[in-house]
Amino acid sequence: MRADVFVAAEAPVMTDIVAGLAQVGLLVVALAVVYRPFGGYLAHVFTTEKHWRVEQAIYRLVRVNPDSEQRWPTYAAGVLGFGFVSALLLYLIQRFQPLLPLNFGRSIPPGMAFNTAVSFTTNTNWQSYVPEQVMGDTVAMAGLTVQNFVSAAMGMAVAVAVIRGFVRFRTDRLGNVWVDLTRATVRILLPISFAFAIVLVGLGAAMSLRSGVSVTGLDGAQHTIALAPSASEEAIKELGTNGGGIFNANSAHPFENPNAWSNLVEIFLLLVIPVSLTRTVGVMVGNPRQGHVLLGVMAVFWTGILTVTWWAEAHPNGPAARLAGAAMEGKETRFGIPSSTLFATSTTGTSTGAVNSMHDSYSGLGGAGPLFHMLLGEISPGGVGTGVYGILVLAIIAVFLAGLMVGRTPEYLGKKLGRREVTFASISILAMPLLVLVGTGLALALPAVTGSSLTNSGAHGLSEVLYAYTSTANNNGSAFAGLTVTNDFYQSTLGIAMVFGRFVPILATLALAGSLAAQRKVPETAGTLPTTGPLFATMLTGAALLVAALTFVPALALGPIAEALA
Amino acid sequence: MTTTLHDHDRPQRTIDEARERHLRNVGRVSAGVFNPRQLLVSLPDALRKLNPRHQLKNPVMFVVWVGSVLVTVFAIGQPGAFTVGVAAWLWFTVVFANLAEAVAEGRGKAQAETLRRTKKETVARRLREDGTEERVPGTELRVGDTVVVEAGEVIPGDGEVIDGIATVDESAITGESAPVIRESGGDRSAVTGGTTVLSDRIVVRISTRPGESFVDRMIALVEGAARQKTPNEIALTILLAVLTIIFLLAVVALQPMAGYSGAQQSVIVLTALLVCLIPTTIGALLSAIGIAGMDRLVQRNVLAMSGRAVEAAGDVDTLLLDKTGTITYGNRQATELIPVGSSTLDDLAGAARLSSLADGTPEGRSIVALCAREHGLPGEPQAGERSAEFVPFTAQTRMSGADLNGRRVRKGAASAVRTWVAEHGGSVPEEVHRIVDEISQQGGTPLVVAESTNGAAVVRGVIRLSDVVKKGMRQRFAELRAMGIKTVMITGDNPLTAKAIAEEAGVDDFLAEARPEDKMALIRREQEGGKLVAMTGDGTNDAPALAQADVGVAMNTGTMAAKEAGNMVDLDSDPTKLIEIVEIGKQLLITRGALTTFSIANDLAKYFAILPAMFVAIYPQLGKLNIMRLHSPQSAILSAVIFNALIIVALIPLALRGVRYRPTTATALLRRNLLIYGVGGIIVPFVGIWLVDLVVRLLPGIG
């Protein structure tokens, strides 16, 4: 994705705050309407004992006994093994593209294939390539889109295993990873994606297997406009919080995201599962208010980041943008500031990474918004599954401190938090900052790397590198374009950031779930710290904010903060 | 010992006395803390703890230690007011942390010293198998040896009285000057080495090896030698280590970023930033908090066998409390006079008082007191009454009373008095039986009073003796309820009586007609529901339940078996102390949590001090973050480091005393502590660093 692809003309800026607020309002209402039924449905999917016939066929095919449950190491081995095999297959499909149909004569070099394989299997969808130039339709549909489904399904599987850790007691079984994976795909992702692909086609998204059409432009020259099976890919791209566009311009491209309505639908799709999963937590632990607290904290961050970003873009500090009245560089005029910032906030709060505007072109503070949103650990509301287990892990740390402050061994959702729980939660939280800080530090410490890859220098250059490692370590995939990431250093280190950013927290959280499930249930008494009220929500918000702020403020000071204060 | 209807020799301590004692203890702690001399006295110990091997035990402080060494090396390379200043204050940070630990340990050492003095060299009179005595040093005694101890001699080791009865002065251990009785058999057979026999002669079977006695364990405990990290402390240490790693990463990664931005930082500045960010405040005070928590128990004469038990006390969900001695006074007291027949209330009061004037039993005294309090009769024998002849209670007559000038008054059990009245030509009115039955059913003890003048016996009425709930108990149980702790009263009374007292005392539940196995079953039931149970006990038959309970507090007056089974021993043998133990356990955790929150919240201000100082040269706009208007980059960094060190010293008293704890709901507690230590933790350093900077900017050589 290149920043210079879409630069808005200095069109009269649409500062229609009312339209923006109406869009936010519609979005919130839509999410509120589906919250209870859909969250409940998700809980039902992962707790029912009945198998669908098509699922039973799959289990027979892969020789899995769907009624046997697994201990956490087995479950984790399933997640890791599946990820490894997926990445390998995806790599091979890309490399063998010239032999496949619908290749349009394109090919993918090894470094790029590795990075893309890792990127799509980790639900990151970081794209170090220009789809129109390297990807054919077979790789896109049989390779990338398949991973869009299963990597999202795997996220949900892990989240459900963690919730089971809280719900179950005195057991070493967390469920069956293959069953959870299959159900998430068959019962949740496939039907919804199918329905919304049709909706998107109706709204004008392109759906074609042709490589493109030739047109004669106003200048009289011949141009090729690329086409792709975009509507179907778009639905799962958002629903699975994947974010990898079939066009380089991603959701800024009119064939992916033609108008304000499709824009709203896409934002709804990328938020709906992570938001509703908090309801699933509530249903499964038997107290919906536990889910409300998590959702409340998510909403506080989402609203806060949206407000800051929106305000910053509407009040830019650069001379050119000031002249224009708002920071319209890198934004689509059909979306304007409100819809662009709404999309940017939602895509970075989930692990989606799809963009309908170029984050690199945002003002200092406006760019810091999406960046900080990811640095919070993607919990507002986070990726499909990853968001909910991410915030549960943070809640464990918050409960630990809060519990000590009320004079009891800390308990959360009926489980005691001791040495093991704190250790696993810490490892899970530690992974992301480690990858971001070490990655950014390393990239900047090597002049050869920095010198050749950055289009910007100074504070903005630092922001670009920081954003790249933040996006990959959080499995977001959105880019502060302007950084050329096609050299081997970035392809490999960003790939590593994606792998560890995905699987270290998964391993740690599954270990945590195993340790929780083995415990007996602690009854809730009047002395138990209630984790449903606004006080705990405040504590959790503070803990998440403080952890992220304290870890990244020095780096942010040299990047976005220096830019914003200039 | 007197022979009474209800025999109890337990020291009768009211709740007020216990509270007073509690306050005294708190006073003792504070007095020690705020004595700056203690800091000086502990300084040599603190310096000794600079040994890296000691520092390794605490990951946070180890990082500070390494940083200090690093900065010192660089400061020597480029000496200046700033570099030397930072180096010096980093070392102070380490020393202050050591000081906190040393002061906490020092107070334990003083107590250990007092205890050691009781471990005088004793000469034991060991009995040979043929019954003759030999004199051996106390240190040579083995388990199973039997020794003779007579009045004026020191008991040479822990053991059990197997023959005889004696009064023993246990003040060396309990601080209680009143002697206690120790006798063979029953629940008062345990004796402790180092205590002195005051009267009579006992034969003791030694039950512990030298060096493992009660006093030895106590010394090890208060000195902190036996201290092991408790589960919550370990979990917290892990969290602190992780935070340290994150900040280490943030600072290490900052250097290339700074280099890229064109402002390479010196190692000194980076180290200063790191030390300010990692949670040094809690890291420095963590072990002092733990030691002080154990110490607070020792100050209250409770000996915890492990820190784990102290923490468990904070988690307790259910408290099992014995009715007698804990919830009610040990003896029943007269609470009502009910006249019968033609007798007036005054007739009954007069007779009841006369019958009890010379009766020294608690019941007797309570009758006189009731007559004095409610019927205006003199509380002391009058001149004319001194010649009265006292008729003591015997097992045969089951009555007591007095004869004065031909007037004979008797009080006692209904059947005994009935016989006496019949013998003296009187009859018992029907209503007496009704009243007696009623009182019995309500859980009281009826005493019938009769009088015979001139050969004609008449029943005057009935005295109601009942359990009296100790003052302040209701409120205490209400507090416990607010803390989420359920109280269960254990009693041998029938369910009806138990219910009446339970309601009066305000306990949540009761177990009536309780046998030891019922107690055990109750504990198991609660534990199966995931609850933590605490109880007190003294008898041998309490031992299994004490062992089963998560927190079992054995009374020091109890048997060895009970003491071995529990995980705490109360030297005062005061069962109400269980409530204080719970509070201390909670206070320990709260102090840790509060100081951790404070420590982390502090970082915000430090960023505002240090980050502009580091980068204002390349990005002047970052100067806007210098909201404290600190004088210069150097003064800002040095001030942050100095504040970081000083806050440790400032919080030592709090760490030792513990955060103030008042029983209330979890939400209220969290709100209060978040406000004080969270919000306060954000604000305090802004003010503190600003104040320090006002002084630091005056230093020569600071730019």
Image: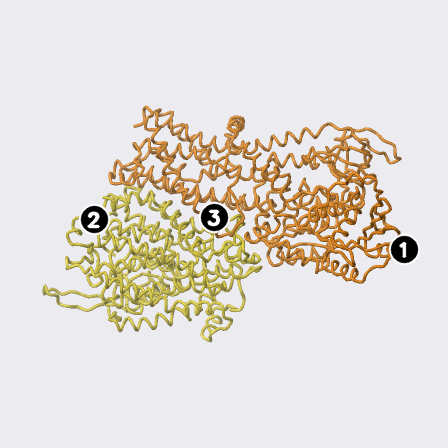
Chain colours: A yellow, B orange
The vertical placement of A356 against A51, above or below, is: above
Label 1: how many Cα within 10 Å (few below 14, some 14–19, many 20+): few
Disc 2: which residue: A317
Q: Is residue A38 visible?
A: yes
Q: Is residue B431 left or right of residue A499?
A: right
Residue A285 in the image, given as x and y percentages of width and height: 49, 62
| Observer-nearest of B425 and B141 | B425
Q: Is residue B110 left or right of residue B684?
A: right
Label 3: how many Cα within 10 Å (few below 14, some 14–19, many 20+): many
Same chain? Circles 2 and 3: yes
- What residue type is disc 2 on? Asn
Q: Which numbered disc flags the more N-terminal residue, 2 or 3? A: 2
Q: CA distance from mark 2 to mark 1?
A: 112 Å
Residue occupying image coordinates x 22% and y 54%: A314
Mark seen at residue B251: none
Residue at the extreme bottom of the image, as rendered: A53
| Secondary structure at numbered mark 1 | helix
Label 2: how many Cα within 10 Å (few below 14, some 14–19, many 20+): some
Residue occupying image coordinates x 60% and y 40%: B22
Label 2: chain letter: A
Disc 3: which residue: A401
Disc 1: which residue: B423
Residue B546 in the image, given as x and y percentages of width and height: 68, 49
